[in-house]
Amino acid sequence: MSETKRALAVLVFLLSVSVLVTTPSTSATETFVFGGCSQLKYAPGSPYESNVNSLLTSAVNSAMSTSYNNFTISGSSSSSSQDTVYGLFQCRGDLNGNDCGRCVARAVSQLGTLCVDSFGGALQLEGCFVKYDNSKFLGVEDKTVVVKKCGPSIGYDSDALTRRDAVLAYLGTSDGSNRPYRVGGSGDVRGEAQCVGDLSASECQDCLSEAIGRLKTECGPAAWGDMFLAKCYARYSEGGSHSRSGNGENDSNNNDEEIEKTLAILIGLIAGVALLIVFLSCLRKICEKGKGGK
Ligand SMILES: *[C@@H]1O[C@H](CO)[C@@H](O)[C@H](O)[C@H]1NC(C)=O
Ligand SMILES: *[C@@H]1O[C@H](CO)[C@@H](O)[C@H](O)[C@H]1NC(C)=O
């Protein structure tokens, strides 16, 4: 009896763990896109470290109320200028304050594990970008390609490609105003572009033109494409052609499906383990009975 009870207790425990594991703790906006750290490391416990920490804390706090902010932290007036750290965050233009705050908090926590003791780090999640460094990069345009991803080809004379080009043309259009976040769609093609808020309107325009031009030349007739430059990105996808999250209703469905799949696999595993435990404890009982009989 006690063996069965023990097995049941284990089953209940594993089930509750599985519920915790499968409860979606990360939404699509917190999906990792890229991250990187500078090679140079600072000495742990240095004034620079405490400046980095206070910068990242300020970013998390600020992200609740604004979608972009920049920071320059030089600590106490006595510390030298080489301890100065510069940083910024940029949330995707469609996020509300809560989602922006959550996204930046997550990005900062990931930077903390990814870039231990690094002088600089940058991390892009679907919904936000966070960067800090000891060199002054604020307000400096930077069109370095950071991440380029292209989907499978859909052929040069497809209607979808015509719509893709229309969406990209729309994203790249300048109306003279400052539009750091742009979104457009045609049919099932959806496009999105975002500049980091330290760029001027014309720098943003220039950066997005570069990203969009690269998407067209380097991805060719791809079903979807991502072009992340250091200070802006442009991306597009055809409905359902890209399992990447964050691009419309279909993705939340994919997400749910994925969670359901994970749950199914976990429950299968747990049932298997529980059966094994019951089986083993029965075996032991049989053995014990066998011994007792002789
Ligand atoms: C940095 O933020 C300040 C306000 O906090 C703003 O006045 C300034 O223009 C920003 N600089 C850049 C490069 O974004
Ligand atoms: C999902 O994508 C397909 C195209 O692949 C589209 O026909 C359908 O309407 C989309 N569903 C939702 C809920 O957006």
Image: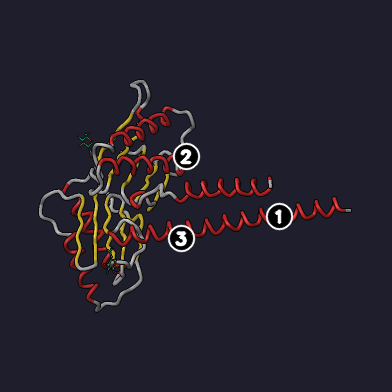
Q: Secondary structure at mark 2?
A: loop
Q: Secondary structure at mark 3?
A: helix
Asked if 153 appears above or below 91 in the picture, the reply is: below
230 and 24: which is toward the camera: 24
* Ligand 2 has an atom within 8 Å of the beta carbon of the residue at disc 3: no
Q: Earlier in the sequence, mark 2 or mark 1?
A: 2
Residue 146 image offset from top left, x and y in percent: 35, 54
Q: CA distance from mark 2 to mark 3?
A: 34 Å
Residue 137 image offset from top left, x and y in percent: 30, 42
Q: Which mark is nearer the camera, 3 or 1?
A: 1
Q: Which mark is nearer the camera, 2 or 1?
A: 1
Q: CA distance from mark 2 to mark 1?
A: 45 Å
**Disc 3, disc 1: CB below 8 Å?**
no
What residue did someone put label 2 on?
A: 116
Residue 270 image offset from top left, x and y in percent: 57, 54
| Outermost left residue | 176
Query: Which label number is shown at residue 280?
Result: 1
The answer to which image quadrant residue 214 occupies is bottom left
**Identity, as a three-letter code, of the amino acid under mark 3:** Lys
Q: Quadrant of ligand 2?
A: bottom left
Q: Residues within 10 Å of mark 2 (few under 14, many from 20)?
A: some
What residue did someone put label 3 on?
A: 261
Residue at figure coordinates x 43%, y 31% from the top left:
49
120 and 13: which is toward the camera: 13
* Ligand 1 has an atom within 8 Å of the beta carbon of the residue at disc 2: no
Q: CA distance from mark 3 to mark 1?
A: 28 Å
Asked if 63 appears above or below 153 in the picture, the reply is: above
